[in-house]
Image (cartoon, grey):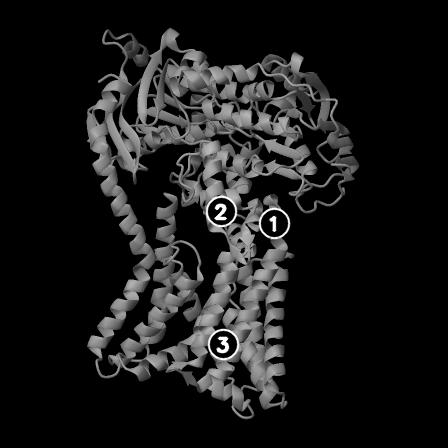
């Protein structure tokens, strides 16, 4: 109740964290240019901007991972130079950061996950399970996590898992409900329902007095969840919007400038009809443990979308088409030839370009340079007269870097040092540089900002126009609507329907990937352990 | 303290930026050059220091020749070890494999009266086969490479003793081989030319062929390599086979250089070779295994040990030195990699 008193105090919003004049260089790159902002209690504050605009760097400065080169940070009575914020300082100032890959241990129960990193309570030298459970129950109740303490984390849906990660991070912060919580892309990888659940929880935490900074590329959720939105571009805070100023178009304009915004909107209006062209990829009644009787066809020059919840079978269908996952029944035909079933074989990399969803694990070579990442499948092309033509490789890399607007524009930069969105652009560029009859894209614009997303979409469209068949899997319904000529809807391993371009809207797609589940098996949509 | 607008922000820090960024860039460039050439500079410093500390014995032609003569075999083995490392695999059997090769080569001539070339051919064929077995067990059966090659190393050192009955084989070795192994051209021992040839071949393979370039990618992320369409299993096997073949060359070279085949020699070279590989990964191309860096590291270790001994330090310093450089090299390359990846 004291919090309510704070809120209605006559002095206006109560500032939880104040940041001023922060400068940060990485070598020659000026990553933060005099960044200042304030985070208020009781508010969700959005932080948006294109890849490489400095969002992540700012978060890292605030959490003490990077040291700034100038500036200051202030929380309550404590004001320190941003040059020497340590993780301990951050904790003392009540700053807690939860990253997108929240470190949750899937095989452990919620109560064990929650008790990690602090001393186990003991009784007569033994771990006191009762006390652990009591602590866990208290945390679960406080953060309104819809699951029981004994549920193994792998049974939770990703939204609840994220809530557990947040609760664990906040559990240790000095003053619960008073500190500053920074969420870095918390909804990446969640579908819309899960993302809504998580954001609902985030709003509740703010309502109790927490100051929350939400870093996200999904503008709809920023618009829906935030009271204030700070937009960054090229290391500068462009503006902070609040109240009625927060709308999608406004944010996009501030992020990318006006020209790109128009192209981006125009992109949405494009329509193509290609279903009369020859078939490149055909599934006839394909079954696996997960898929049931899936039939599909992707035509030349067509962009086919696969929509479904995580685990509905979309990604698996791509893996089968690429020849790296086995199938049991049915028939898969790729460019007129039948793919062997039963046994996963060699990747069909001559005919098919594939972008996996798990970029760090499967999509890129983090310890190698951008140039090597771009050229990794083209090594033979540069081998002439017994020597590797590094000059030609570099020239081609530079052209791709320019074409895909990869930042930094240095072919020698190490892949892990790029922001997530730019890494994704490198992976896309690597796959799209070569003409192949089929392109399989699993979450092609994950972690990529609006401007770059429009670029990537345009490149995909160009590739399709040149006659390639493209199959796209995305958890972002808006992306499928914008990009695809046709979308096949997957529910529980079945194709339940196909939507033509004219029928496509986000609402219809969202409803169709969820509706059948709701009537068939209402429980499987949410996590186990929903009891009070 | 409200949020800043682009106008006032660009007005304030921008003018300062160029000089500051420029200075930093220069520093960063210098730092990188220092990292690349650091080991070479250390090598030169070591040469100067020991020349001052032991002016009568260290900076002499005889000593230089002795260093080249007695470290070329180690150099070949270290270069052989680089190749599986690049593919992301350990080969801890590389030195034992070289020792096994030297015993096979020596025993065929000494105990069975074979001619030189067939003996060399069979030795290298067998060490390559050992690489093939390692590769198949690691790549096809999915056994961890440290465990696999540790096991192979033990088997090989046992086989070496069995072949030689525990003796050093010194009779019946082809005189041409002995003559080559102890000979010099223009004052440079012949064995050193073999090392340089191996360095050139391995360097060419890793840096100039599609196979080598792909091998670095494989070593970085096996799953991504598979998805890009690389024949990951076959490449891993080939990397082990090439390592085994080069180790066989090292073994034959040892027979030439020492004039005998000693079952103790191989296993003892494992740590010196690994030390050179890890130390080599901190130079020339910091953070990645590379042949040139490895060569410089072998030279640095050889000069340091020779210098220490000639300056009057006791023998026991040698294993201590190797142990320390091994750990320091790995620590250093870990730090470099962290700096490189900004983590």
Identity of the residue drawn at 63% across and 61% down: B137
Q: Is the residue B227 above or below the residue A130 in the image?
A: below
Tag 1, which secondary structure? loop
| Residue A154 relative to residue A78: left or right | right
Do labels 1 and 3 touch, CB within 8 Å? no
Residue plotted at (54% across, 50% down): A382
Q: Which residue is mark 3?
A: B266
Which residue corresponds to mark 1? Answer: B230
- The image position of residue B191, as x and y in percent, is 45, 79
Number of on-image labels: 3
Q: Which residue is mark 2?
A: A392
- Give the CA distance from mark 1 to mark 3: 34 Å
Query: Mark 1 or 3, which is nearer the eye?
Result: 1
Residue B217 visible to the viewer: yes
Residue at image point 76% right, 42% down: A341
- The single residue placed furthest to the bottom in the displayed view is B171
Q: Chain of mark 1?
A: B
For mark 3, name the chain: B
Query: Which quadrant is the C terminus of chain B positioned in?
Result: top left
- For residue A525, side relative to residue B90 (left or right): right
Q: Is residue A102 visible?
A: no
Discs 2/1, front = 2
Residue B291: x %, y % from top left? 44, 63
Which of A438/A447 is in front?
Answer: A438
x, y percent for residue B43: 30, 67
Q: Earlier in the sequence, mark 1 or mark 3?
A: 1
Mark 2 residue element: helix
């Amino acid at each position: 109740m004291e919090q309510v008193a704070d809120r209605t105090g006559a002095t206006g919003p109560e500032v939880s964290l104040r940041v001023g004049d922060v400068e940060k260089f990485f070598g020659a790159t000026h990553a933060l240019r005099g960044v200042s902002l304030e985070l208020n209690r009781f508010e969700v504050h959005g932080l948006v901007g294109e890849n490489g605009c400095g969002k992540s760097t700012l978060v890292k400065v605030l959490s003490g991972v990077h040291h700034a080169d100038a500036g200051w940070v202030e929380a309550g009575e404590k004001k320190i130079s941003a040059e020497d914020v340590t993780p301990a300082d951050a904790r003392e100032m009540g700053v807690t950061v939860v990253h997108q890959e929240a470190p949750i241990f899937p095989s452990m129960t919620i109560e064990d996950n929650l008790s990690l990193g602090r001393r186990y309570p003991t009784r007569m030298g033994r771990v006191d399970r009762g006390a652990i459970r009591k602590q866990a129950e208290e945390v679960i109740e406080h953060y309104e996590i819809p699951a029981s303490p004994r549920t193994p984390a792998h049974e939770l849906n990703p939204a609840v898992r994220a809530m557990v990660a947040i609760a664990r991070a906040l559990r240790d912060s000095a003053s619960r409900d008073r500190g500053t919580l920074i969420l870095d892309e918390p909804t990446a990888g969640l579908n819309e329902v899960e993302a809504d659940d998580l954001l609902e929880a985030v709003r509740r935490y703010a309502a109790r007095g927490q100051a929350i900074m939400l870093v996200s590329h999904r503008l709809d959720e920023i618009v829906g969840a935030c009271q204030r939105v700070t937009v960054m571009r090229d290391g500068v805070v462009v503006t902070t919007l609040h109240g009625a100023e927060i709308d999608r178009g406004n944010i996009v304009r501030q992020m990318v400038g006006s020209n790109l915004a128009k192209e981006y909107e125009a992109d949405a209006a494009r329509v193509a009809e290609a279903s009369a062209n020859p078939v490149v990829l055909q599934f006839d009644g394909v079954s696996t443990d997960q898929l049931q009787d899936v039939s599909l066809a992707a035509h030349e020059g067509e962009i086919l979308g696969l929509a479904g919840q995580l685990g509905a079978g979309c990604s698996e269908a791509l893996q089968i088409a690429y020849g790296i996952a086995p199938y049991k029944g049915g028939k898969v035909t790729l460019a007129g030839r039948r793919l062997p079933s039963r046994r996963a074989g060699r990747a069909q990399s001559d005919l098919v370009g594939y972008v996996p969803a798990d970029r760090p694990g499967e999509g890129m070579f983090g310890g190698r340079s951008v140039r090597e990442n771009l050229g990794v499948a083209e090594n033979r092309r540069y081998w002439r007269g017994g020597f590797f033509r590094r000059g030609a490789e570099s020239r081609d890399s530079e052209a791709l870097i320019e074409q895909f607007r990869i930042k930094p524009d240095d072919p020698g930069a190490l892949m892990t040092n790029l922001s997530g969105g730019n890494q994704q652009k490198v992976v896309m560029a690597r796959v799209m540089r070569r003409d192949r009859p089929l392109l399989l894209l699993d979450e092609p614009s994950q972690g990529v900002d609006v401007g770059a997303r429009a670029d990537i979409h345009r490149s995909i469209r160009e590739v399709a126009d040149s006659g390639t068949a493209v199959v796209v899997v995305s958890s972002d319904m808006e992306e499928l609507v914008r990009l695809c000529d046709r979308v096949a809807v997957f529910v529980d391993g079945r194709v339940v329907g196909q939507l033509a371009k004219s029928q496509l809207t986000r609402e219809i797609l969202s409803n169709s990937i969820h509706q059948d589940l709701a009537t068939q098996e209402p429980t499987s949509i949410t996590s186990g352990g929903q009891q009070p | 303290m409200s949020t800043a607008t682009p106008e006032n922000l660009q007005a304030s820090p921008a003018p300062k930026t160029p000089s500051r960024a420029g200075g930093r860039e220069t520093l960063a460039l210098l730092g990188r050059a220092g990292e690349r050439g650091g080991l070479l500079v250390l090598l030169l410093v070591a040469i100067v220091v020991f020349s001052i500390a032991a002016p009568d014995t260290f900076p002499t032609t005889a000593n230089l020749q002795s260093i080249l003569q007695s470290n070329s075999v180690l150099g070949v083995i270290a270069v052989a070890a680089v190749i599986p490392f690049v593919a992301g695999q350990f080969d801890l059997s590389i030195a034992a494999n070289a020792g096994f090769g030297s015993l096979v080569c020596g025993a065929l001539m000494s105990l069975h009266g074979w001619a030189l070339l067939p003996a060399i051919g069979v030795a290298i064929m067998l060490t390559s086969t050992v690489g093939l077995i390692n590769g198949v067990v690691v790549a096809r059966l999915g056994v961890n490479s440290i465990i696999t090659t540790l096991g192979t190393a033990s088997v090989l050192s046992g086989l070496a003793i069995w072949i030689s009955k525990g003796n050093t084989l010194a009779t019946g070795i082809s005189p041409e081989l002995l003559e080559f192994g102890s000979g010099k051209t223009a004052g440079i021992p012949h064995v050193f030319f073999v090392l340089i040839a191996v360095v050139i071949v391995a360097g060419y393979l890793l840096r100039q062929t599609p196979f080598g370039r792909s091998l670095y990618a494989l070593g970085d992320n096996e799953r991504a390599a598979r998805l890009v369409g690389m024949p990951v299993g076959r490449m891993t096997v080939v990397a082990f086979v090439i390592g085994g073949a080069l180790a066989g060359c090292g073994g034959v070279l040892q027979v030439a250089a020492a004039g005998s085949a000693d079952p103790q020699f191989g296993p003892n070279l494992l740590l010196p070779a690994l030390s050179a590989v890890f130390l080599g990964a901190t130079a020339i191309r910091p953070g990645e295994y590379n042949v040139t860096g490895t060569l410089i590291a072998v030279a640095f270790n050889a000069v340091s040990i020779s210098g220490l001994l000639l300056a009057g330090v006791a023998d026991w310093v040698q294993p201590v030195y190797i142990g320390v450089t091994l750990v320091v090299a790995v620590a250093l390359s870990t730090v470099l990699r962290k700096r490189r990846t900004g983590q």
